[in-house]
Amino acid sequence: MKMLNVALPKGRLGEKVYDMFEKAGFPCPSIKENNRKLIFENQEVGVRYFWVKPSDVAIYVERGAADIGVAGKDILVEYRPDVYELLDLKMGKCDMAVAAKADFEDDRTKTLVVATKFTNVAKDYYGSLGRDIDIIHLNGSIEIAPILGLSDVIVDIVETGTTLKENNLVVVEKFMPISARLIANKANFKFKSELIEKIKQSLAKQTEN
Ligand code: PRP
């Protein structure tokens, strides 16, 4: 039997997503065993799961190494992978936001310095406002940048707001709601459309509950 390859985002969200796939009729009990393995398959139902970094899911799917996967809308907007976005799973909800020190005041006569992991998102957002910016691309711990004077603001994901609060930053504006999406490789979707549609329907039903 041809296996369905599913890229899951490593972490709590991925585990929840696996549970939904299990309910959809694609169990793979060995995945629950606590070990460092990254690939799990159940030949009986024809599914192979692999855990990848959340930001890498779209790469596996775009290149066809995975038929389907679950990726955050933030990654899809930032990297624009050439994949089908099949379903909003309404999980992993957070917001893309601008944040700064509480006393920050925007001086529109100056170029705004923005630190972010999401360079394209930041460019598009400020572009739509007609605001000149200078982008500093960082890979994590973005919240430190304004504190040390590396940037004026940051563009980052806010979920509970705890990271900002604990680093004395405030939200300036939330401008894009984010959630997890089911995505599919375009070519593989043609060959496995029936199966993928079936999974999509089941996941859609589960997200309604
Ligand atoms: C994200 C984001 C914030 C934090 C927001 O980081 O970059 O730092 O979560 O969550 P909160 O509002 O609930 O505090 P992540 O944990 O993905 O780590 P990273 O810094 O490596 O990106």
Image: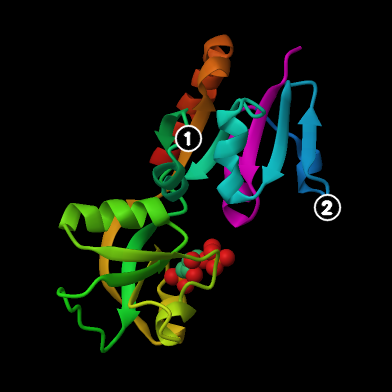
Q: Is residue 152 above or below residue 177?
A: below
The residue positioned 56% from the left and 49% from the top of the image is 55
- The answer to whether residue 41 is left or right of residue 172 is right
Q: Which residue is mark 2?
A: 36
Q: Quadrant of residue 173?
A: bottom left
Q: Is residue 16 visible?
A: no
The amino acid beneath tag 2 is Arg
Q: Viewed as shown, does residue 98 lie left or right of 11?
A: left
Q: Nearer the viewer, mark 2 or mark 1?
A: 1
Q: Quadrant of the N terminus?
A: top right
List x then y, in percent, for residue 142. 48, 72
Which residue has dot 1 on it? 81
Disc 1, SS: loop
- Between 62 and 124, the one nearer to me in the picture: 124
Alpha carbon separation for disc pair 2 and 1: 28 Å
The residue under the point 75% across, 35% down is: 28
Percent position (x, y) of residue 128? Answer: 19, 52
Seen in the picture, residue 178 relative to 166 is either above or below; the reply is above
As for residue 5 lying within the magenta part, the answer is yes
Element carrying mark 2: loop
The residues colored magenta run 1-25
The amino acid type of the residue labelled 1 equals Pro
Residue at the image position 60 percent from the left and 45 percent from the top: 56
